[in-house]
Amino acid sequence: MEKQLYTLNNQELDRVLGIWNEKSSVYVPVGKGEDIQLMPLGEAERTEDYINLTLPVKEMVFEQKEKLFKWKRSKDHIEVTGLSGEHTKNRIFYGVRACDTYGVSYTDRFFGKEFPDTNYQSRRAETTIIGVNCLRAGKHCFCTSIGTGVFSTTGYDLAFTPMDSYFLVEVGTERGAELIDQAKPYFKETDEGILKEKDALREKVEESFPLKMDLSNLWDDMARTFDADFWLDEAHACIGCTGCTNVCPTCTCFNVVEENIDKDEGTRVRYWDSCQSEHFTRNAEYHNPRDAVSRVRYRIYDKLKYIEERFGHKGCSGCGRCTDVCPTYISIIDIMQAMRKTAEENPEPPAVHQTTKIRHIIRDREIKNRHGLYAPDVATITGIKQETPEIKRLFMKYDDPELHKSYEHKGQFFQVTVFGKGELPLSIPYGPDQSDELVFDFKDVGSVTDVLFEMKVGDKVGLRGPYGHAYPYNSIKGRNLLFIGSGVAMAPLRTIIEPAVKNPDDFNQIHILASALRYENLLYKEEMIQWAKVPSLRVQYALKEATDKVKAHQGHVNDLLPDLNIDWSNTTAMVCASPERIRKVSGDLMDLGMNPKDILVTLETHMRCGAGKCGHCKVGSHYMCVDGPVFTYEEMMALPPEF
Amino acid sequence: MNDISDAEFIMVIGSNTTEQHPLASTRIFEALDKGAELYVIDPRKIRLTDFAHAHAPIEPGRNLPMINAMIHVIIKEDLVDEEFIKNRTENYEEMKESVRDCTPEWAEELSRVPADTIRQFARKYATTDKAMILFTMGVTQQTTGVKSIRALANLAMITGHVGRPSTGINPLRGQNNVQGAGDMGTLPDFLPGYQRPEWPETKERFSKLWGDFSCLRGRNIIEMFNLMDEGKMKAAYIVGENPVLSDPDQIHTIHCLEKVPFLVVQDIFLTETAKYADVVLPAVSFLEREGTYTNTDRRVQMIHKVIDPIGNAKPDWEIMIEIMKRIGMDVNYQSPSDIMDEINESAELYGGISHDRIQEVGIQWPCPDKEHPGTPILHVDEFKRGKGLFTVNDWEFIGDQRSEEFPFLVTTGRVTHQYHTGTMTRKVWTLALEYPEGFVEIHTKDAEELGVKDHQPIRITSARGSIVAPAMVTNRINEKTLFVPFHFAESPANRLTGQNLDPIINIPALKVSAVRIEVEK
């Protein structure tokens, strides 16, 4: 678009806002001091005397609480209605600073691609953003150091720059141009000559910024201070109030909560969640891959590095709000300075996971759910099998048979909803040619599985998926396959075992090593006996307790590896276990001569939304749910040690 | 509050400030930034100790010997402020005599704080100009609660750390409006504005406002529950309080609530206490009403209604008025502001604080008239009673001690993300998730001896009752000492606490109970 430039007399601003307010709802800054918010025009006196909005404009398009869908159970079916479009329409936000327009350009990117977030897109499509450039800095402003300000360069429909008695108005989008048209008589076209004046003003404002940091070495400094002592001080100080993430223009994490009217009716909503909460990454049985230090450090690394690495946008817009609100004075500015100082005076060897070149392809995917990304399709349980005392197998069909026809088998797991209770990821334990029925194996470990475990044939659940990056098939044809799994962790391996058993000629030798405490706890006991009938396939068991049911090794699965006697260089291993077990098994496999690129592992750490949006499963710049859960061992070792 | 930021020395005793008063702790961090020193007295290595210059890992319940020993050191080493003592106080000699034998070595025996640490605390406090003391329930909820506070007053007065900015002994209030509730006479022995009912001028003043009324001293909560137990108290009306979880000796509390013939509970949710009520009156939350809160600064601040009341719930004042009308009283309040007008007339401390003056910024009482700007610092030129009275606070122990049967002491408190009995915070998903359940902090060494692993459920039993909660094995607590938060109905800390009371004002010793531990299989 050709650069469109206008001027608007200061005196005419309110008249123009009034004109726009006829067709839209115009929101303007009101309040005083540090308490500034966007309010509908006319509800309170508009102010121009403010440094910044207390909360970034993001809160208007990614609201603190949003409804995802509602569900209602009647006699023999459950009705699901997507609610992503339930919000205030057609709003114009006037007075947004450069740091926040930058933030919006990032959230547009974040929510808009891969699995597009229907809630965000619906709100954003009804939002117009008018930036007003800053003429002075707040106490903790550092946009000039980060490079996101001081004047807006992106994320606005119109950008105003206050120049004495008039505003310079720059048009950023078609939507902005339409607004000009609506109030055309008040806008005077001008030429690019005025940009010189604007630049001079910008330089003057930049000059006045109290805080200037040279961040050219930042990523190198970060790689050399990952384990620095100062992180312990920051961790001691953090009380987990989550204020920093609540005020951040680029924070996008959320948690979903069931809000039920009764047992037959409810709504699933999402609320902002915070990586600074202890519970954000806590798994069952108190296990938490992030301790106090990695929790505090993660936020800083995400803002200064991981977001930019993945999305190409700065993850920190330099607004300084997190530093303003911290009750214990944790300051991203001080931390950047501490990184610089420590990297200079007392550097560590660069952390491998910060310098690694191993990156994942970001795949653009779309889930063809009927009611939006986060609303499940209803399915009915058609069969139940008790696999082990703790593991059940559920067979189900979509209530809408069309969904089976359009089913595409390209992921690794589904998000299964127990209406009124919650949602959890379950692996797909079947091959690509099964499309008329969905099957899940699961262990009773938490409040959602508690209910799922008690369900009967005819009961209804919700399904979203399939999600995730699955085990490859075509690229490993012709090789030896080695499957290593214990207990319920055999389930994901079955996506490859099933087709391999049907097409054994696709592969050379196939080995399945199944481990458990005792034989009864093994998943797929009968199937494994059947699979073992394939001539090129061998099943071995490693059990802690002896059994008379099958011939089994009494001990660890690792003990079986040296005797497999296969060409390790032509072998692909698929290991499904806890990260600690994966490390042990993979170490042994590498000792035997395997390349870590040929060891495929799954990391199913606290995945919630499945679509790379809620943020819970992010490790470094990767989302376990979309980049994984299947990784090569080489990729796994290149992740920060926080999974 | 801003006085804290300007202090040069802050002694925190019996207060887990970062967890319970995070915004007060912000001021401590500001002071630290400016170079202040922070000393902490607590049986646990609370978060503040990570930033403290000294920590006294005191035995629960033994504050008084340590404070008296600090006074002893200051007198012995001649670090007293003689001018202040001479001009502003009385009874110094008697107090001095009473601490003659309170040597740091004597206190070390009792408090387990090394004598040299006590000396360090005493010297630093006495020799720093702007030295302030912050305290909370770790000092007061003890059998020696009153004596310890008086001893802290002695400590502040011998060093002249009173009546100036960034000095004094400062209680951080446990609730947003506990100060205001006390100011308004929800104390058994005061009418609003700390006026004793037995003073003739009180009777005269209130009779003008309310007509003839009973002017007898009331009962405190411990006495009331005992009267229910004895069958003498026939009805109870509990407003915004959840004694089933917050009062000592839960089994006794529940017994009394079951026994009292008529029980009314007024609260915003159906609390554990409300489950025993004959009538539950639904009240609104702070978002649904107008009025004022008086904070720890004695600052009276407006709250504004944000949403309309949900369902049939009403603000507390409206419910009260409905009841007053039904018992035949002639009441005529249209709004909280009308009530404030009456407060202006009845309590001199609030004389000039009207709603229209505090719309934006609150006023600190005393504020006797409409022109008065409020009073940021008390006791500037004169104490309320005139001269500051030194008191004698001899150490004498009442209450639970370790024994063969009960070899541990348990102390109770809170965590950052839960508030009091969890009536509100346990209903908020994010707070509930952050601390979903109770726990027992136990020292690593004790856990090893007992074979207790981290997160393993353990049963702790006192002479009153017993609870089960997962162990939190840590070296951030004294040995032979446990900590249990009291928010959780599933593991109610106050089933363990008892009726050991401070003999002067009957505050229960919630911070010290002797218990034993059994490992749950």
Image (cartoon, coloured by chain):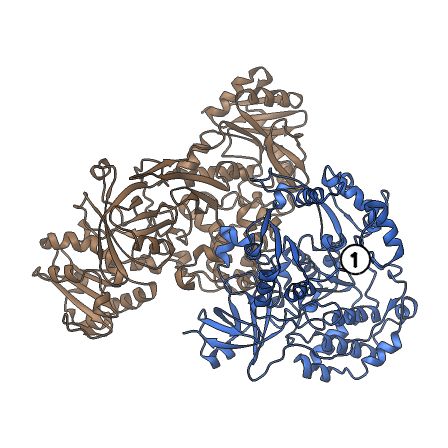
Chain colours: A brown, B blue
* Residue A518 or residue A380, whichever sits in front: A380
Name the residue at 23% across, 59% down: A490
Would you call the spot at circle 1 few (<14 residues within 10 Å), some (14-19), or many (20 or more)? many
Amino acid type, mark 1? Phe
Query: Which x, y percent locates residue A492?
Result: 25, 55
Tally of marks: 1
Residue found 73% across the figure and 37% down from its top: B334
Q: Image quadrant of residue B60? A: bottom right
Quarter of the image for residue A531 reads bottom left
Write the residue at 43% across / 73% down: B520
Quadrant where the C terminus of chain A sits is: bottom left
Residue pointed to by mark 1: B190
Q: Nearer the viewer, residue A412 or A305?
A: A412
Residue A36: image quadrant is top right
Residue furthest top as drawn: A185
Element type at mark 1: loop
Q: Is residue B247 visible?
A: yes
Residue A13, image x and y in percent? Answer: 63, 23
Q: Is residue A190 at least partly visible in the picture?
A: no
**Residue B82 at x, y = what percent?**
89, 72
Taking A121 as reference, is A631 left or right?
left
Relative to B267, residue A5 above or below: above
- Front residue of B506/A148: it is B506
User: Residue B105 location in percent, x, y?
Assistant: 72, 84
User: Which residue reaches farthest right?
Assistant: B87
On the rendered image, what quadrant is the N terminus of chain A found in? Answer: top left
Q: Chain of mark 1?
A: B
